[in-house]
C-alpha cells in the first residue's frame, strides 16, 4: 500500500474536510474567510507541513519523496472533494521555507499554528503515517517523531498512543 493510500486511511473526519476546504478558500484571491475558516486553513497548512517535515528530516527531500507527498496531499484533497489547491506550489513553498529557516524553526512555526489539541493530534497522526510508510522508522524519523510530540505539546503517553493507533491502522 502506497503512502497516499495509507494517509487516506488516517485523514478521515468532518473537521479534516472542513479544514481542507477552508485552506483551498484561503488560496483564492479576494476570498473572505471567517475567523473559524482562517484558523482551519492555517491548521490544515500546518498539518501538511508537518508531513513534509517528516519526509525532510534527513535533510533532503528527493524528487521521489516530493512525488509521494504530493500524492498523499492529493489523496486528502480528493477524499474531501476539495478544489483550488495547487499542491506543487504548496510543496515548493514548504521546501523554500525549510531551506530558508531550517527544520527546527519550521517545526516550531508549525507547532504554533496548531492551536487546538485535536489539530496537534491530527497533524502528529499524519506525520507519523509518513514515518511509517515503509514499516520501518529510521533513527532520524524516530528523533523527528519525538521532536514533533514535544512541539505539539503531546505527552509521552499521548504520542505513544497515537503512534500505536497509527501503526495498527496501517499494518493491522
Image (tube, helix red, strand yellow):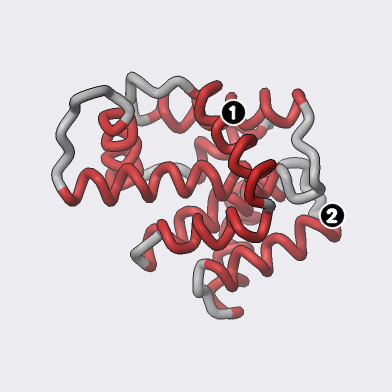
Q: How many marks?
A: 2
For the residue pair 162 and 142, the one nearer the viewer reads as: 142
Horizontal arrangement in the rendering, residue 82 relative to residue 164 (left or right): left
Q: Residue at x 50, y 57 (%)?
A: 109
Q: Position of residue 162 (x, y in %)?
A: 55, 64
For label 1, the SS is helix
Q: Crowding at label 2, few (<14), some or many (≥20) Cα neighbours within 10 Å?
A: few
Residue furthest right as drawn: 139
Q: Residue at x 39, y 58 (%)?
A: 119
Locate residue 60: give its quadrant.
top right
Q: Crowding at label 1, few (<14), some or many (≥20) Cα neighbours within 10 Å?
A: few
Q: Residue at x 59, y 69 (%)?
A: 149
Residue for badge 2: 138
The image quadrant where one finds the N terminus is top right
Residue 37 visible, this angle: yes
- In this rendering, the answer to whether 166 lies above or below 51 is below
Q: Position of residue 26 (x, y in %)?
A: 28, 33
For the residue pair 133 and 142, the one nearer the viewer reads as: 142
Residue for badge 1: 92
Image marks 2 and 1: residues in contact by CB distance under 8 Å: no
The nearer-to-camera label among 2 and 1 is 1
Residue furthest front as drawn: 100
For label 2, the SS is loop
Residue 172 visible, this angle: no
Amino acid at each position: 500500500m502506497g503512502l497516499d493510500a495509507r494517509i487516506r486511511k488516517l485523514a478521515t473526519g468532518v473537521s479534516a474536510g472542513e479544514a481542507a476546504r477552508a485552506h483551498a478558500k484561503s488560496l483564492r484571491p479576494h476570498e473572505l474567510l471567517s475567523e473559524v475558516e482562517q484558523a482551519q486553513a492555517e491548521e490544515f497548512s500546518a498539518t501538511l507541513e508537518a508531513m513534509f517535515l517528516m519526509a525532510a528530516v534527513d535533510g533532503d527531500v528527493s524528487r521521489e519523496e516530493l512525488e509521494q507527498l504530493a500524492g498523499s496531499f492529493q489523496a486528502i484533497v480528493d477524499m474531501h472533494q476539495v478544489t483550488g489547491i495547487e499542491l506543487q506550489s504548496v510543496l515548493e513553498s514548504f521546501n523554500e521555507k525549510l531551506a530558508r529557516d531550517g527544520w527546527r524553526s519550521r517545526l516550531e512555526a508549525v507547532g504554533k499554528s496548531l492551536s487546538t489539541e485535536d489539530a496537534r493530534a491530527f497533524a502528529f497522526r499524519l506525520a507519523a503515517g509518513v514515518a511509517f510508510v515503509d514499516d520501518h522508522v529510521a533513527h532520524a524519523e524516530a528523533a523527528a517523531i519525538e521532536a514533533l510530540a514535544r512541539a505539539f505539546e503531546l505527552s509521552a503517553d499521548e504520542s505513544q498512543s497515537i503512534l500505536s493507533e497509527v501503526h495498527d491502522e496501517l499494518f493491522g
